[in-house]
Amino acid sequence: MDWQDRYEPRRAPDPVLRLMTADDIPAAGDVLHSVGWRTDVRRWERILYWEPEGCFALDEPGRGVIGTVSTTTYGTALGWIGMMVIAGDRQKRGYGRQLMRAALDYLIARGTERIMLDASDMGRPLYESLNFRPLHKHYRWEGRASTYLGPRARRLEAGDLDAVIALDTQLYGIPRPHILTKLLEDYPGMAWVDETRGGLQGFLMARQEVGHGVYLGPWMALTAESGERLLRTALEQFQGQDVTMNVSDVNGRAMQIAERHNLRRGSGTQRMIYGDAFPVQGEPLAELSITSYATG
């Protein structure tokens, strides 16, 4: 035993900040589980596919990954920060700030016009200290899928893709074909479009989350009637399964439709934006359910 061992505790090596890779996904899942978050391997695979140079891990020598953060970019118009989590027994040591600075530095260096995230109650003080300000809240709406009377939408076909991307760009406010095409590739047959004589009115994409039922979103529609036709179709497809979607608290249209279909509001997050930037100017009432908290 040397002097340091006898008279002062040996200091653990500092974690190393580095780019996250696909090999880190199992360990990242363990970190998420340690704080009670849901995880799905395919979610991390998509996030790394979308932004391989913008996802970071904190690696503790002798232990492995103890923290993660992701970014997802939409050209330079928008950068989204997500999956920011520190292992339960390594919190309150400044590691979250270190990861957030890495994500911010990456997005700022790209010339990103606006940077946004969805914050838990626990994370919000950190984000506020880094110059994020609150906008509005999103809540999880959950329930058991069942069948309801009324007209239906139809399944999305390959020939619909260009029209879906064009409508989404109009409603979301910026183009995001990389997001939509990857979701369709990962979950073929789990997307629907609503069409009238006036053309495409809306679309809904779904995905199966391992061990957690079905997530519905993005769900975009020009009118409440179109949105309801899409939701009826999806709920019929997943009868008896648990379904979840994330809805803005300023979208009364989406909340009314959800209530009519026996979905109930659960926990929420605070949407935040960095600095003095303004959100993308899309059509907020048309975004009935977001893609995910991790990607916006």
Image: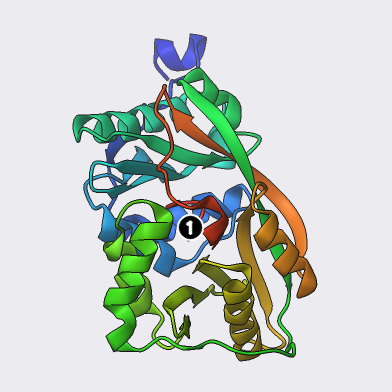
192 vs 168: above or below: below
Residue at the image position 65 percent from the left and 83 percent from the top: 232
Residue toward you, 152 or 82 = 152
Q: Quadrant of residue 181?
A: bottom left
Q: Quadrant of residue 82?
A: top left
Left or right of 2: which side holds 127? Answer: right
Badge count: 1
Residue toward you, 7 or 161 = 161
Does the image show residue 86? no
Residue toward you, 279 or 47 = 279
x and y percent of residue 85 in the render?
A: 50, 42
x and y percent of residue 222 in the render?
A: 51, 66
> Helix, strand or loop at disc 1?
helix
Left or right of 145: which side holds 77? Answer: left
Tell me the residue that label 1 is attached to: 29
Instruction: Name the amino acid, label 1.
Output: Gly
x and y percent of residue 10 in the render?
A: 44, 20
30 vs 63: above or below: below
Residue toward you, 127 or 235 = 235
| Residue located farthest toward the front when viewing the structure as drawn | 198
15 vs 249: above or below: above
Quadrant holding the N terminus: top left
Left or right of 170: which side holds 254? Answer: right
x and y percent of residue 249 in the render?
A: 67, 48
How dense is the environment of label 1, judged by Cα within 10 Å: few (below 14), some, or many (20 and up)?
A: some
284 vs 289: above or below: above
Residue at the image position 51 percent from the left and 76 percent from the top: 206
